[in-house]
Amino acid sequence: MAGKVIFSVLSERQDGKIGDDWRYEVEVKVFNEGLKGKGTISVPKHNLASGQTMDPHGAPAPLELEAGEPGSELKIWMRLVATEVDLFRNDTGESELNFTMACPLAGDAPLVMEKEISCGVTEKPVVADSTSIFRVQVRLEASAS
């Protein structure tokens, strides 16, 4: 029997005045007595206006990650790297998030968790109102077969 986690991006949003051309990636790792699964969802450059929440650009496919032994506690690590794309110099921010979730036993219903990960992106050189907050809502579904 093996556990798995399906990881997907549900929505994206940015709030700020530094620009509306964005790209980002969300990296995820699943630990269960060591690293079991890892992957990255990358979203290419696209337009995202300030204050707008939308489905992830390009509808990126979910990741199916190994999770090890069913019935155990999983440790999840995520990293968001968001880039506001400029003509001469891109502005980038990143953050990490750590949390735990249970991996159900075979035959049990999948467990679903939604999380938000966000980071600040500061335009360089720094001027007034030069920071945007970029947010991504993700979904994790742990199951066992």
Image (cartoon, rainbow, N blue to C red):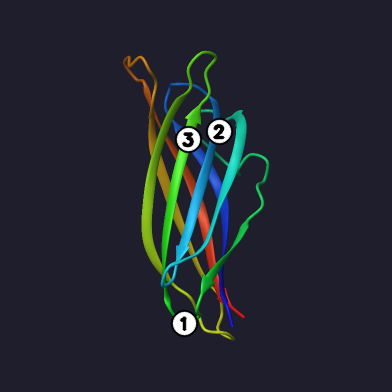
The part of the image, by quadrant, that contains residue 66 is bottom right
Residue 21: image x %, image y %? 56, 25
| Picture residue at 52% right of the left edge, 70% below the top | 67
Lateral position of residue 29 relative to residue 21, left or right: left
First in sequence: mark 3 vs mark 1: 1
Q: Which residue is mark 1?
A: 71
- Report if the CB atoms under discs 3 and 2 are less than 8 Å apart: yes
| Picture residue at 44% right of the left edge, 52% below the top | 78
Residue 9: image x %, image y %? 56, 51
Lateral position of residue 19 relative to residue 130, left or right: right
Residue 57: image x %, image y %? 63, 39
Q: Amino acid at mark 2?
A: Arg
Q: Which residue is mark 2?
A: 23
| Picture residue at 61% right of the left edge, 57% below the top | 63
Task: Name the foreground residue: 30 vs 84.
Answer: 30
Check disc 2: other Cα within 10 Å, few if <14, some if 14-19, many if 20+: some
Task: Name the foreground residue: 21 vs 89.
Answer: 89
| Image: 89 above or below 119 | above
Q: Could you tell me how far apart the alpha carbons at marks 3 and 1 are, in whole angstroms?
A: 34 Å
Q: In the rendered image, which quarter contains the C terminus?
A: bottom right
| Image: 106 above or below 4 | below
Q: Which residue is mark 3?
A: 82
Task: Name the foreground residue: 29 vs 34.
Answer: 34
Q: Secondary structure at mark 2?
A: strand
Check disc 1: other Cα within 10 Å, few if <14, some if 14-19, many if 20+: some
Furthest residue toward bottom: 107
